[in-house]
Amino acid sequence: MKWFYRLLIIVTLTTAPVFATASETILVLGDSLSAAFGIEKEQGWVSLLQQRLNKNGYSHKVTNASISGETTAGGLARFKPLLERHQPTIVIIELGANDGLRGQSLRIMQQNIQKIIQKTRQQQGKVLLVGMQLPANYGLAYTSQFHRIYQKLSQQNDIPLVPFLMQGLEDNAKHFLPDRLHPTAAAQPILLSNIWKELEPLLKQRE
C-alpha cells in the first residue's frame, strides 16, 4: 500500500491550486511634470513613488507613460494600447497643463480626460486625477474655468483628486528650474507628498 500513498501525495501536489502573486500596476499618464523634465529620471516624483511603495510593503509596479509636452488629446490617443499592455489597477492622470498653456478648448480638454477615466473603469481600474493651475496672466475667467474642470470631473465620477500637483512649492530657485515652470529635484518629494495623500487610500482599498 506504500505505493498508493506515494501516488496520492503526488496527485495532491500536482493538482493543488496555484495562486498568482503578480504585482499590480500603477500607470502614470502625464506630461513633463511627471516625466522628470530637466532632472535625472531617478529624481522625479514617479521614481520616488516606486521607492515609497517598496518601503511601505506594497508590491505595485509603477509604469511611467508620461511625455514632455503631452496634451489631453495626445494622452487619450496613446491610452488604449497602454491600457491593453499594462492592464493597470490604478491610473494616475496628470494632464491638462499644456492644453491650458496653449489656450486650447477647455470643453475638449474635459471630454478627453473623461474618456480616459471611462476607459480605465471599463477595465475595472481606479483613477486618481491630478489637478493643475495656470498663471494669472491667462485671465481670471479662463484660469478659473480651467481649475474647475478637475473638480467637476472628480465629483461627477466620484474619484479622488489631488487639487494641485505643485501645492506647497515656494517660488524660488530651490524649487524651480530657470524656466520657472518645472520643479527641481529638490521639489520632487513635495510633489510626491501631494500625490501620496490621495493615492494611499486607493492602495489600502485594494488590500
Image: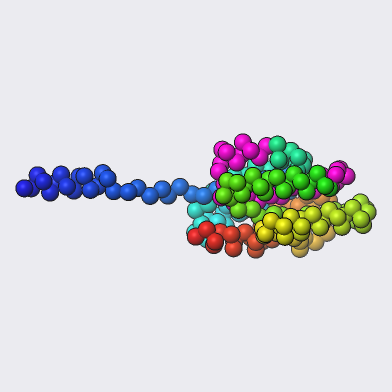
Q: Quadrant of residue 66?
A: top right
> Residue 26 or 8: which is nearer the viewer?
8
> Residue 149 or 22: which is nearer the viewer?
149
Segment tinted magenta in the rendering = 78-105
Instruction: Determine if residue 98 is in view.
Output: no
80 horizontally vs 104: left or right: left
x 56%, y 59%: residue: 203
75 horizontally vs 171: left or right: left
Q: Is residue 158 magenta?
A: no
Q: Where does the image place residue 20, in percent across and percent down from the top left?
A: 41, 48
91 horizontally vs 72: left or right: left
Q: Is residue 90 magenta?
A: yes
Q: Where does the image place residue 160, in percent across and percent down from the top left?
A: 67, 60
Q: Is residue 121 above or below residue 84?
A: below
Residue, far left: 1
96 horizontally vs 21: left or right: right
> Residue 69 or 129: which is nearer the viewer?
129
